[in-house]
Image (cartoon, rainbow, N blue to C red):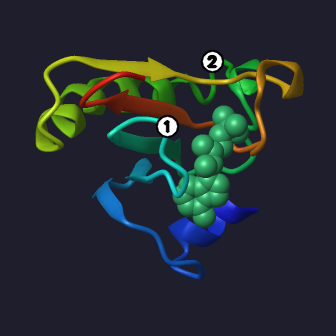
Amino acid sequence: MIFQKIINREVPSDIVYEDDYLIAFKDVNPKAKVHVLIVPKDSSIQNLNDINKGNIYYIEKIFLAVPSIAASLGLTDYKLLTNCGRGAGQEIFHLHFHLMGGGPC
Ligand code: AMP
């Protein structure tokens, strides 16, 4: 899985934030001037449908980190979204949040 390989440093990426629970890196095909992906370090969570009481702490960690990641990228206004399922446009089945801003997105 590509995002796990990024976490493992087996695939290069432009990492903007990392801690014990999550990693954030620039989207390789940005749809906004600033477009990063925020990813929990648990590839068994494919999307929001896999969130449960045992792993909800990843969501807490991610949401608590979003404002400082956004600020570090110079964003005051931004969009945060996650695609859940192929029909919603999900291509990579490792939960991730798109953080986008810096212009139209
Ligand atoms: P989604 O369609 O929500 O699953 O989003 C997957 C995103 O991952 C897309 O915006 C891709 O451009 C992005 N992506 C795929 N491979 C990489 C990669 N190696 N490094 C950074 N972003 C990637």
Q: Position of residue 4 (x, y in %)?
A: 64, 63
Instruction: Identify which residue, 49 or 74, lies in the foreground.
Output: 74
* Residue drawn 55% across the image and 68% down it: 6
Q: Residues within 10 Å of mark 2 (few under 14, many from 20)?
A: few
| Badge 1 amino acid | Lys
* Residue drawn 37% across the image and 66% down it: 14
Q: Position of residue 32 (x, y in %)?
A: 40, 35
Q: Position of residue 17 (x, y in %)?
A: 28, 54
Residue identified by numbered label 1: 31
Residue identified by numbered label 2: 53
Q: Residue furthest front?
A: 104
Please indicate whether residue 85 sits to the left or right of residue 5 in the image. right
Q: Is mark 1 within 8 Å of ligand 1?
A: yes
Q: Is residue 101 above or below residue 38?
A: above
| Badge 2 amino acid | Lys
Under tag 1, what secondary structure? loop
Under tag 2, what secondary structure? loop
Q: Residue furthest right?
A: 87
Mark found first going from the N terminus, 1 or 2: 1
